[in-house]
Image: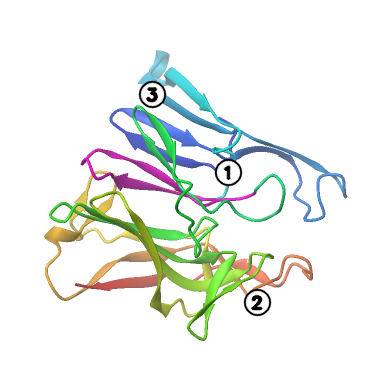
Amino acid sequence: MAVTGGGAGYLNGRFYLVGGQKFSGRYNPHGPDHGPGFAQEYTNEIRSFALEDGAGGTPVISNYRAQRDEEHLHRRDYNLVPQVFPDGKPGFTMFAGVFQYKADIPWLYPVDIREDGYQPVPAFEQQYSHYHSAHLPVYSRQSREMHTLFFGGIAQYYRHNNETKEDKEVPFVKTISQVTRAANGTLTEWALPVELPDLSGASAWLALHENMPRLPGDLLDWDALPPGEHLVGYIVGGIRSSAPNIFWPNTGKQSSASATVMAVYLRK
């Protein structure tokens, strides 16, 4: 269970710990052999288990299972988002994540996770949100459409002057993007015409407002939302960067923990 950068979820009585890595030592951007050094080992697994009350009320892990895949599950620092699939059954999707084996660039295709297994979706490439960021799942039972909104963060691609640009240094971005899963299962992505006010969103969380209608898994219930503009939640925490690319020319002052709470409105 010593996992960082993984995703955690809960579905029908079982907890899911997906992807991530075991990291030991002190982080150094120049690699594990510089300075004090460190070791990292990707889990390459979907780990699921139940929790029960043990002696004295101590939680005990039970019914532990692990699915291992060194190709499709080799990911960390990504968005694990609750989903409702076209057949109406709940699950999760691993969106993007880092890093590929042959290059320090993100994986672009998602992996769908259900109770009975997982399925990579290599035919779809996600462009705009590759690192863990604030995100919001929105589902419509009437249209059977699953929408996932991503707010800023870090990505290999971004929008500039109405064009999609690529930066393999994977910079901080202001992009707000959306991935929609249609009733027939087709995935479509686009960047929204509004951006975050600064280079933030990475490692942040979006908390739904307590008055918002929601489905299990904290999905916003789109059909139950009246027409008009609504305060749906707040983006909290994360990293604020002073420039898109700060990884190498870094003295420790180019980024900071965000001290701003951003209100998020949706208009129906």
| Region in magenta | 78-99
Relative height, residue 211 to residue 185 (above, below): below
Residue 84, image x and y in percent? 27, 45
Q: Residues within 10 Å of mark 3 (few under 14, many from 20)?
A: some
SS for tag 3?
A: strand
Identify residue for label 1.
75
Is 89 magenta? The answer is yes
Relative height, residue 201 to residue 144 (above, below): below
Q: Amino acid at mark 2?
A: Ala
Q: Residues within 10 Å of mark 1 (few under 14, many from 20)?
A: many
Q: Classify residue 3 by image quadrant.
A: top right
Nearest-to-viewer mark from 2 and 1: 1
Q: Amino acid at mark 1?
A: Arg
The dot on residue 51 is: 3
Q: Kindly report the distance in space between the C-alpha atoms of the residues bearing marks 1 and 3.
A: 25 Å
Q: Classify residue 5 by image quadrant.
A: top right
Q: Kindly report the distance in space between the C-alpha atoms of the residues bearing marks 3 and 2.
A: 43 Å
Q: Residues within 10 Å of mark 2 (few under 14, many from 20)?
A: some
Q: Residue furthest top?
A: 55
Q: For this rendering, which residue is in front, 56 or 254?
A: 254
Asked if residue 187 lies left or right of residue 111, the reply is left
Identify residue for label 2.
243
Task: Return the disc, 3 or 2, that comes first in the chain's sequence.
Answer: 3
Task: Return the disc, 2 or 1, that comes first in the chain's sequence.
Answer: 1
